[in-house]
Amino acid sequence: MSLTPLIGSERTLATSASIVGRLKPGRLVRITVLVRPEKDPESNELAGFATQLASSPLRERAPLSREAYTATYGIAPSDVRRVMQFARKYGLRVVGQPNRGARTVDLQGTATTMGRVFGVELVRVQEQGNIYRSYTGPISIPSDAENLIENIFGFSTRPQVSPRIAYLPRPGIAAPHVGAAAFTADQVAKAYNFPAATGKGQTIAILELGGGARVRDLVTYFKSLNIPKPTIIFVPVGGGSNSPTGNPDSADGEVMLDIEVAGAVAPGAKIVVYFGLNTNQGFFRLINRAVHDRRYSPSIVSISWGGPEDTYTAQDLTSFNKAFQAAAAMGVSVFVAAGDQGSTDGEPPVAHVDFPASSPFVTACGGTRLLTGAGGAVTSETVWNDGAAGGATGGGISAVFPVPDYQQNLYMPQSPNPGAGPGRGVPDVSGNADPVTGYKIIVDGASIVVGGTSAVAPLWAGLAALINESLGQSLGFANPLLYSTTVAAAPGALYDVTQGNNDTTNLGAYYAGPGWDACSGMGTPRGTALLNALQST
């Protein structure tokens, strides 16, 4: 059998990791195969359609339905049959139903069979107390499937991402801020002058890769705000589940922050929380499940999890980005936290941006420190930076994705990394994220204050629901609109944050200033003015 390496699938072990043994030969392994689209994958037609759609005036946009997308860009029925024939030929079994829209098919086989078919040696790896499955080097594809299989997920079970939540610093970690106070999410919405709507008729998808929510805590939270509890639905995906740990400092805090912020901002919206496993396979499944979900049909997706770009394989970055292209083509808005560890994204001494925030087809959400005065009016807003111990907003220049069309006319700072060139700038927008001026939430029976850019993604998702209801249509991929002259020049639509930086390790990058910057993006929302500007696009 002739094998061809899959370019960009190579993995290397982290410096803190070591191989502790081979996977048992008879151990069953389940993988997700990404199949080529029915359209010629080299034509880049999908990217062109998504970009053209997003650059069209809002009222003229005609996104594809999920059914139309599947028919146009999904797996051809003949290729589904080819995958099944491939599986039988090589001793693998098709598991579950193929997802034609997401172009995925799950296959199962023993470790020995997987190793023989795809040229990988599956090993057990220990890293910082965790043991997971992985491989080194590239994945290879049998020659008779080279033009059929684009990527494979699931050979590695290393945790892929972390929640972008920041807990209120303990005394002495962050200097006190004069006038600082925590908020409930509806108070932040009021400070940002969100439109007088509820999000009725809208569905917000929230993606979670760990933790869970207790319904009694949600009932208590919304009752405390005197806000009707929104309809909240939990959807398990690929082995994930709503599994609260009982520890407020666990991923439970992320789950509750996401639900409570989005629900307080848009209580009339339906909130569907998708739970997946924290692996590259689990995250990819989760994104596709929400984007292609015909049952709940979310028009807005909120993601508060991420990791530095270099923690993904090159091929995985490409595959994830195509999933977000699909969302843009179907008129789905995706809001993603930009990270909580400053310009290094927790990997000093060089700069990194967080992914999926760096995908050019999502709206990356950075963080600020919000101070208010009498009546809840904003008195000051600066970039969130409490130092290395307290956290700071992510942001910077992508090392992977080029400058997208909607950022071509901006002044983009140079990455401080040696030899770095221009790239997609992160974030696009921002919002209150400093835990010192953070959000009051209830999690596992405890009332706590948290922040992080993971609060900003659901905040913007809730605002999008209000805007969608008011416009009578989906905002869809928001970035070309947010960067447009119509919105950027509209009085008060986006507040330009010009003070502060996200440098926590003396790299010297990046600083806020007039216009777009790599700390706060285009700025923070002033909801009603933003809605008015969008109505004129």
Image (cartoon, rainbow, N blue to C red):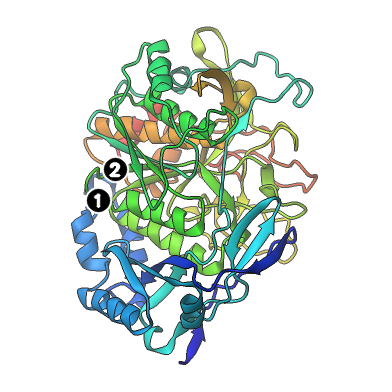
Give above or below for 115 relative to 339.
below
Q: Which mark is residue 505?
A: none
Q: Nearer the viewer, residue 413 or 371?
A: 371
Kind of element beneath mark 1: loop
Badge 1 crowding class, 10 Å Cα cut-off, few under 14, some 14 to 19, many 20 or more, is some
Tell me the residue at 39%/76% (across/down): 149
Q: Which mark is residue 298?
A: 2
Give above or below for 465 relative to 309.
above
Q: Nearer the viewer, residue 130 or 76?
A: 130
- Asked which quadrant contains residue 195, the reply is top left
Q: Nearer the viewer, residue 7 or 250?
A: 250
Identify residue type, mark 1: Arg
Image location of residue 302, percent across then percent down: 42, 41
How many numbered dots are placed on residues in this image? 2
Quote the CA–CA distance across marks 1 and 2: 18 Å
Image location of residue 212, percent across then percent down: 46, 34
Give above or below for 507 relative to 438.
below
- Asked which quadrant contains residue 9, the reply is bottom right
Residue 484 in view: no
Do tag 1 and tag 2 residues touch (Cβ < 8 Å)?
no
Identify residue type, mark 2: Pro
Q: Nearer the viewer, residue 417 or 273?
A: 273
Image location of residue 375, percent across then percent down: 49, 8
Image location of residue 437, percent across then percent down: 60, 21
Q: Which residue is mark 1?
A: 61
